[in-house]
Image (cartoon, coloured by chain):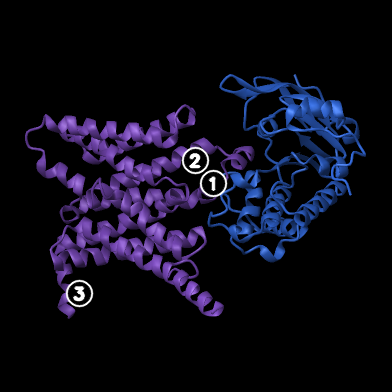
Amino acid sequence: MIDFFSDPWSFEFMQRALVASVIVSVVAAVVGSFVILKGMAFIGDALPHASFGGVAIAFALGGSLYLGGAIAALTTAMLIGFISRRGLLKYDTAIGILFVAAFALGLAVISREDNYTGDLFAFVFGNVLAVTWDDIYLTAAIGGAILIFIALFYKELLFTSYDPAMSAAAGLPVAAFQYGLLALVALTTVIAIQTIGVILVVALLITPAATAQLLVRSLPAIMLLGATIGAASSLIGLYVAWHADLSASASIVLTATALFVVAFAIAPGRGAVWGAAAVRRRRRGAS
Amino acid sequence: MAVASEHVVDVRDLSAGYNGHAALEHVSFTIEPGCLAGLVGPNGSGKSTLLKVMLGLHKPWSGEVLIFGHSERPTHGHVGYTPQTELVDWTFPVTVMDVVLMGRYGKLGLVRRPGRRDRELATAALERVRLADRARRQIGELSGGEQRRALIARALAQEADLLLLDEPLAGLDATAQHDLLRLLEELRTEGKTLFVATHDLSCVAADFDHAVLLNCRVVAFGRPADVFTEENLSDAFQRHLFVLPEGTTIVGS
């Protein structure tokens, strides 16, 4: 039994995988709390795909894949903000046009490369077991910077998310914070793609924060519980991946989804089970 | 160049709109201190646009808005604003106290957190609108009338002397509407100037000091009794309102 729990961690690559995925899922859950409140789930899906374009170009040029991904994600985020602020197109239309373009650019570039399969596929589907300590230091540095930014500007991010009109009237630089939030999502994306992969990043942004939102009511509590749920999903997901011989990123995401389903069923006062029980009570009362 | 003005609000020849479509044309009017003023007009008459220009949220094409004699915008402390309640996200996970504290954010500047004085002002504002017992509730738990009062408390916590209220009376039942009007009258007595966008003509006619009748341009402004003449109303509302002469019996008894 003890072996069952300690077995995976006797290997250093599993320790690295755990550290990396816990950092990433904690940061993603905190940033994700704003993403779900602002209804930005689509952007949480789009920016990782867009970053793939930059990763592919960096790969072709032999540059840093992280830097390439960061530039592509940030550029796409700023362009989405710019186009939708002009008011000519709806927000989600701007997202839809731009992210597929960046992703397609990535595909076009790698189709010209001869031996792209290994490294680039790690970015599409994630390869947390191949994370190096250098990757972890970089992830921790960027993730730490994101959390410090949110701690410093919590008040402004809250106010501009909740009531942009009043924030502007009060003299806050609303546009700067809206772009800032997009940049946070873009950077979170960049540190998450190696761990979880382009396609599944959105799950780390959305699912733990949404699970927390079902269970607690204040924004700081959603961030804290979301981060805990994200970290727990990483730990449990890696166990399951180890023992069932599954893809680690898929296992982490499915664990987070399972926790969401449990919360959805039992959420106090709002969950499905609670609702069904209330209906039964009412019926019994009526008869 | 701005000329000193003794009016709280002095709007001069203001024109504004969106994508080339005019919402306001050559709008001019004034509001005096300590006055409960109504902004009345049909849907699409430019009421919300006018409030946005006054708040500095929308740039006018021409003309100017002087508030307490100044034309600089955003106005930071002086102007409080309560948006239409359907434009507020009531599911957002913040408490009533959190929302009222937001009234202090403009004065706090970047990074700084609300301190004890900010909390005292927020608490006093909540007491003023009789919501002190709701401070720790999530905003979605408030009734319609309480929602309006929470937004007013935010403007009071801001220590605003001029309050712009966008449709605060809409969607309230008679009792809640009555309570809110009493609160607005009390605030006026305490020296606040209130400018209330509404399409409720009878409330303005009965309880307000001043009315601005708007339909893209200012049809009339002044005392409600002088503004709400049959001619002005049919001019502003055109076919949307059928004005009956006073004393007309609608349903025979």
- Name which quarter of the figure residue A64 lies in: top left
**Residue A278 vs residue B193, the one in the foreground:** A278
Three-letter code for the amino acid on which mark 3 is drawn: Phe
**Residue B212 vs residue A287, the one in the foreground:** A287
Q: Which chain is purple?
A: A
Q: Are marks 1 and 2 in contact (CB under 8 Å)?
A: yes
The mark that comes first in sequence, 2 or 3, is: 3
Taking the spot 59% from the left edge, 58% from the top edge, the residue there is B140
Q: Residues within 10 Å of mark 2 (few under 14, many from 20)?
A: some
Q: Which chain is blue?
A: B
Q: Do we see residue B166 in this rendering?
A: yes
Residues at discs 2 and 3 both on one chain: yes
Q: CA distance from mark 1 to mark 3?
A: 43 Å
The image shows residue B64, relative to residue A120, as above or below, that is above
Q: Position of residue B133 (x, y in %)?
A: 70, 66
Three-letter code for the amino acid on which mark 2 is drawn: Phe
* Residue located beneath label 2 in the image: A177
The mark that comes first in sequence, 1 or 3, is: 3
**Residue positioned most to the front:** B252
Looking at the rendered structure, which numbered label has been put on residue A5?
3
Three-letter code for the amino acid on which mark 1 is drawn: Glu
The mark that comes first in sequence, 1 or 2, is: 1
